[in-house]
Amino acid sequence: MIEMHDVWKTYPNGAPALQGISVRIDKGEFVYVVGPSGAGKSTFIKLMYREERPSKGSIFVNGFNIERLKERKIPLLRRQIGVVFQDFKLLPNLTVRENIAYALEVIEAPTKRIRSRVSEVLELVGLTEKANALPNQLSGGQQQRVSIARSLVNNPAVIIADEPTGNLDPETSMDIVRLFDEINNRGTTIVMATHDKEIVNRFKRRVLAIENGLLVRDEKRGVYGYES
Amino acid sequence: MKARTLGRHAREGFRNLGRNGWMTFASISAVTVTLLLLGVFLLLAYNLGEISKQIEAQVEMNVFVVEGAGQAEIRELERQLKALPGVATTSFVSKEVALEQMREKLKDLLEGYDDADNPLPDKFVVKPTDPLQIEALSKRVETLPLVAKVNYGEETVTQMFQWTEWIRNAGGVFVVGLCFTALFLISNTIKVTIFARRKEIEIMKLVGATNWFIRWPFLFEGLLIGVLGSLLPMLAIYVAYDYLYVASAAFPMFQLAPVDPLVHTVLGILIAIGALIGMIGSVMSISRFLKV
């Protein structure tokens, strides 16, 4: 599903973010990526949906060779993976329904299919009544659920989440992780960077710990391992 | 791209006008102001050009016939003049008629002269097809036999041509300059309004939109902004010029060019420039935000 071989990333200002990461994530896994701020978690995540390019090494995501991927073909990659962000990244002028539909409009899906599929994922994330609300009329947790619904709508093989609970209170965070868990149970791979000790220690899953750009720990049913 | 998607882009572009109300207003205002200026200037430049053309068209030359030429020779000369390239009209003025005309102008000063001792020669009044070529034409006419002298008021005419050419050039420079100012001002305003939406463009890219999928609605939005922005200047110019044209009838010297086809052409130019600049402005402005 996702494979990295000796991946290095140095930013133009000279800061080394990743220094030789090799990892393999299989289909259907649920993986936490943990580590202190600035350790390279975000870079690790961004490489997977080609917001950043590796300086060295090779990355394969769902069959795409990331470093060889042409600029024009990036959208094709992003349509096969769902990405969820800390700040939700919803289009402020579009309703909940329109925001989710957007991910289907870009692949020019038939209108009927868009309508039924959007209703389906809205029900899955429990926001059917909010379909016509604008993002700013929703709570943080609700907005994150919209963004998860959008990431799901294309039936992606993998969902990549960068600190999805970073802006949410603990209780809401738990709800979000339960939602990811449910999605994972349906066979979707989940890669989630997080700072949330509670979550990692309670929903025990595979843990990748990154420190100073190095993969320092890879445990099947790991714990958070840092004092946050 | 499917046709249905093109419809979606048009719809989306139209709805974005409302969603970004204030920015739309700012962009449309920029288009309105610059196109109004441009339209006024186009009309001004065209009319100045027309007036200088009218002045130039009054240029003509006197071709004096040698003393003692007979009827047949004069007719032959007329034939030769008409055959010259660059000659628009010729008209023969006999020495008798010339004296009459002179008498009218000078009245008593010519008291002593009559037809018997008329000092004036026969002449042809020749109008050139292109007033600016009058010098070359006069040289050609001078070489004809039976021509004593050619006179077209050389100094006055040369000076006048310098003026009319200057007026035309200045008008042209201003119009071109104004076009560029319009392009700059409008695309800059659109750029500022789109800058506020760079986050949206980033999000669209992150959920897998291609660059053209993002560009199309902006293209339609720019088109609409350009067209909407040109409506007010078009109306204002049409009404104002119509009024001025009627009023100018009282001053034959400054008679404006007729409304049709001039104003219709200018209106067409304005809406075309508005639409074009609107589209170019928005597509250019988003391109730097598409690199996500």
Image (spheres, coloured by chain):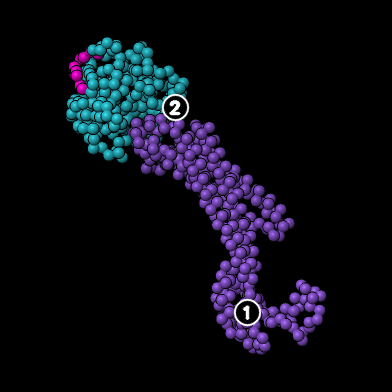
Q: CA distance from mark 1 to mark 2?
A: 84 Å
Q: Position of residue B270 (x, y in %)?
A: 55, 48
Q: Chain of mark 2?
A: A
Residue at (53, 36) in percent of width and height: B26
Side of B174 relative to A134 (left or right): right
Horizontal and vertical percent position of residue A54: 24, 32
The residue that mark 2 highlights is A92
Is A170 within the magenta? no
**Nearest-to-viewer mark from 1 and 2:** 1
Side of A2 where B219 appears, left or right = right
Q: Is residue A5 above or below residue A181?
A: below
Label for residue B149?
A: 1
Element type at mark 1: strand
The answer, for residue B81, to whether it is visible in the render is yes
Q: Kindly identify the amino acid type of the residue bearing the numbered disc 1.
A: Lys
Q: Colour of chain A?
A: cyan
Q: Residues within 10 Å of mark 2 (few under 14, many from 20)?
A: some
Residue at 72% over, 78% down: B98
Quadrant the N terminus of chain B occupies: top left
Which residue range is magenta in the image? A214-224
Camera-side residue: B91 or B168? Answer: B168
Q: Colour of chain B?
A: purple
Query: How many badges with numbers are in the image?
Result: 2
Location of residue B97 in the rendering, given as x and y in whole percent from the top left corner: 73, 79
Question: Mark 2 belongs to which amino acid?
Answer: Pro
Mark 1: few, some, or many residues within 10 Å (few <14, many ≥20)? some
Residue B275 visible to the viewer: no
Q: Which mark is residue B60?
A: none
